[in-house]
Image: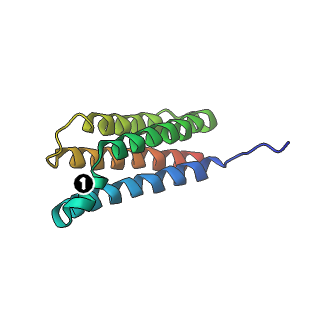
Amino acid sequence: MAQLTIPFGRLDRIAMGLSGLCVVHCVATAVLLGLVASAGGFLGQPIIHEVGLTLAMAIGSFALGRGILEHGFMMPSAVGGLGLGVMTGALTLPHDGTEAAYTVAGVLILALGHRLNAMASE
């Protein structure tokens, strides 16, 4: 039976791509809330943020953890963990624009952690 193996760098690139999609989602939600209330209302549902955060935590933890095992550096994982923490904290903020700002900041910090992880793996 063949075993599925994903190269270390590819997993980080996938995670960075998902981080980018999260930024696009947050910006698009803010724009759509201003332009089209019904579409913005759908994208602004808490379940979208909760599912997105769950995916980010699962993929981020796996990718950053594998990086520690491969190259032994803790810094990428610490930076990525900080980003995940900021994203988690953003869920507790009111929906007045501060949540989106903190989420985008957390996503950018997480993407930096994945980039550092990919660079350490090279």
- In this view, the residue in front, 113 or 6, is 6
- Point out the residue furthest to the left here: 96
Q: Position of residue 82 (x, y in %)?
A: 35, 35
Q: Quadrant of residue 29?
A: bottom left
Q: Position of residue 120 (x, y in %)?
A: 54, 45
Q: Specify the color scheme.
A: rainbow
Question: Left or right: where does residue 97 sit relative to residue 17?
Answer: left
Q: How many marks?
A: 1
Q: Position of residue 73 (x, y in %)?
A: 52, 35
24 up-or-down from 97: above or below: below
- Point out the residue furthest to the bottom here: 35
Find numbered disc 1 in the image and state the secondary structure of the residue it sits on.
helix
Residue at x 50% of width, y 35% of height: 61
Instruction: For residue 14, say whether it is visible.
Output: yes
Residue at x 29% of width, y 54% of height: 42
54 up-or-down from 31: above or below: above
Q: Position of residue 92 (x, y in %)?
A: 23, 33
Query: Which residue in the structure is indicated by mark 1?
Result: 41
- In this view, the residue in front, 69 or 95, is 95
Residue at x 32% of width, y 40% of height: 87
Quick one: label 1, few (<14), some, or many (20+) residues within 10 Å? Answer: few
- In this view, the residue in front, 101 or 93, is 93
Residue type, numbered disc 1: Gly
Question: Left or right: where does residue 65 sit relative to residue 45?
Answer: right
